[in-house]
Image: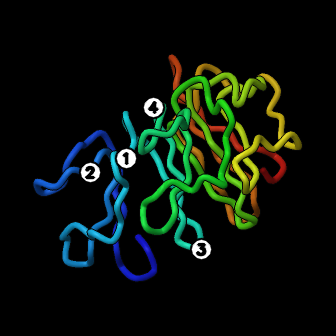
């Protein structure tokens, strides 16, 4: 929910209350569609997660390969009006689905999911992105988790908690801040 009470929703839908909205929409406080948030053609496949920053920009992750017709492999940042923020450049992006994300206080984004590389660099299921969308080389989880991360959250001290899914559910906490 935004500070003004408006709600941004994402998923696999293609319309909201009869209006075309591909996988992301913003609702007014009364539940009606906010027409000032216009994603154009939106994401071309499912949006699984999002993070809202203090400036009102929305970072989204999922299964999509493009947003409003522009290549964005599974991660994109939107301006407050729903248009693509072209200054957030992810390069080739994630090679698998992004299932969860968390926004750090410094604006960096931690993504998690079923990917094994980001922008051509090995990153097993978890990666940290700089504020411009590039991969943060200072964060390397090594072999990461197996087989994927379904949820990630930040603790108040900056460490992350992740939940992975395999034959047994697992919970892991990173010892140092991410």
Q: Identify which residue, 69 or 136, lies in the foreground.
A: 69
Query: What's the distance in space between the residues labelled 4 and 2, CA to CA?
Result: 16 Å
Q: Position of residue 83 (x, y in %)?
A: 46, 58
Q: Position of residue 44 (x, y in %)?
A: 37, 35
Residue occupied by mark 4: 63
Seen as rendered, the residue at the extreme right is 138
Quarter location, residue 69: top left
Residue occupied by mark 2: 21
The residue at 49%/53% (across/down) is 50
Mark drawn on residue 26? none
Left or right of 88 on screen, residue 69: left
Residue occupied by mark 1: 42
The residue at 35%/66% (across/down) is 37
Seen as rendered, the residue at the extreme top is 167
Q: Are marks 1 and 2 in contact (CB under 8 Å)?
A: yes
Quarter location, residue 19: bottom left
Q: Residues within 10 Å of mark 4 (few under 14, many from 20)?
A: many
**If you read the primary sequence from the N terminus, does the residue marked by circle 3 or circle 4 appear first?**
3
Q: Residues within 10 Å of mark 2 (few under 14, many from 20)?
A: many
Q: Identify which residue, 134 or 165, lies in the foreground.
A: 134
> In the rendered view, would you say 90 is above or below 26?
above
Q: Secondary structure at mark 3?
A: loop
**If you read the primary sequence from the N terminus, does the residue marked by circle 4 or circle 2 appear first?**
2
């Amino acid at each position: 929910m935004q500070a003004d009470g408006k709600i941004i929703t994402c998923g696999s839908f293609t319309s909201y209350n009869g209006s075309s909205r591909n996988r992301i929409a913003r609702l007014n406080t009364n539940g009606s569609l906010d027409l000032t948030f216009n994603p154009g053609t939106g994401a071309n496949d499912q949006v699984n997660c999002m993070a809202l920053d203090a400036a009102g920009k929305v970072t989204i992750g999922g299964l999509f390969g493009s947003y409003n017709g522009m290549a964005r492999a599974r991660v994109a940042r939107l301006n407050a009006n729903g248009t693509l923020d072209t200054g957030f450049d992810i390069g080739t992006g994630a090679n698998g689905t992004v299932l969860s994300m968390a926004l750090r206080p410094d604006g960096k984004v931690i993504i998690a999911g079923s990917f094994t590389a980001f922008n051509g660099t090995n990153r097993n299921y978890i990666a940290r992105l700089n504020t411009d969308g590039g991969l943060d080389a200072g964060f390397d989880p090594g072999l990461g988790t197996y087989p994927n991360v379904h949820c990630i959250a930040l603790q108040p001290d900056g460490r992350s908690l992740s939940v992975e899914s395999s034959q047994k559910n697992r919970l892991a906490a990173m010892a140092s801040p991410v």
